[in-house]
Image: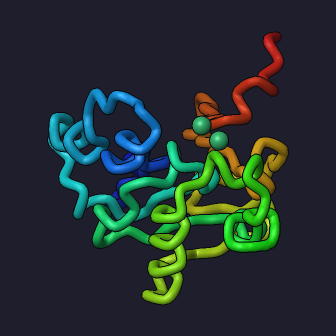
């Protein structure tokens, strides 16, 4: 979660209780509840960056009623296209999460990006791909420090 002036930006939305059940995973805390415990209501989130559409990053999208969702063109194309005909490629995706992303698109609430982009001053997204075709990471530069939220590209980190 990033606070930037009036805006509250969430990076990824975790997995849904239904998907946890389906995959035999224990949900320790629902992301909306985790935010609530921080004093943040889901409806106060203004922006959600979806790093990629894998089930553990893009569940619960419908729980953020006021948010604009930032997603890469090629991630949506990948998650709704021919590659999903292959079991192995489809496995990390949840159809409900992908369908939610499509519904949000039809509600005009998805801001698509084609490659690197700036969401607001000091907050940029960077297309990495690889792990999923349109995987993006988030970079926050407040003028003093730089923080990168690397999502599932963390293994590319170079220790200096
Ligand atoms: Zn992933
Ligand atoms: Zn992941």
Does the rendering let one see residue 126? no
Q: Give x and y (percent) for residue 36.
A: 17, 43
Q: Give x and y (percent) for residue 78.
A: 76, 66
Q: Is residue 79 left or right of residue 50?
A: right
Q: Which quarter of the rendering shows the N terminus?
A: top left
- The residue lying at 66 percent from left, 61 percent from top is 118
Q: Is residue 49 left or right of residue 154?
A: left
Q: Which quarter of the rendering shows the C terminus?
A: top right
Q: Is residue 44 left or right of residue 5?
A: left
- The residue lying at 81 percent from left, 47 percent from top is 128
Q: Is residue 141 left or right of residue 96?
A: right
Q: Between residues 140 and 30, which one lies in front from this camera angle?
A: 30
- The residue lying at 81 percent from left, 27 percent from top is 156
Q: Is residue 113 above or below residue 50?
A: below
Q: Give x and y (percent) for residue 75.
A: 72, 63
Q: Give x and y (percent) for residue 59.
A: 43, 54
Instruction: Give the colour scheme shown.
Output: rainbow
């Amino acid at each position: 979660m990033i606070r930037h002036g009036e805006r509250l930006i969430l990076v990824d939305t975790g997995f849904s209780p239904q998907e946890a059940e389906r995959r035999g995973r224990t949900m320790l805390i629902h992301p909306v509840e985790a935010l609530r415990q921080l004093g943040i209501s889901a409806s106060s989130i203004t922006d959600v960056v979806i790093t990629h559409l894998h089930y553990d990053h893009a569940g619960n999208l419908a729980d953020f009623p006021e948010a604009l969702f930032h997603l890469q063109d090629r991630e949506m194309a990948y998650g709704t296209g021919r590659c999903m005909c292959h079991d192995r490629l489809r496995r990390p995706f949840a159809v409900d999460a992908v369908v939610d992303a499509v519904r949000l698109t039809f509600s005009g609430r998805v801001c698509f990006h084609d490659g690197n982009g700036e969401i607001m001053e000091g907050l940029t997204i960077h297309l990495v791909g690889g792990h999923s075709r349109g995987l993006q990471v988030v970079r926050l530069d407040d003028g003093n420090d730089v923080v990168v939220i690397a999502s599932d590209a963390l293994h590319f980190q170079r220790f200096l």
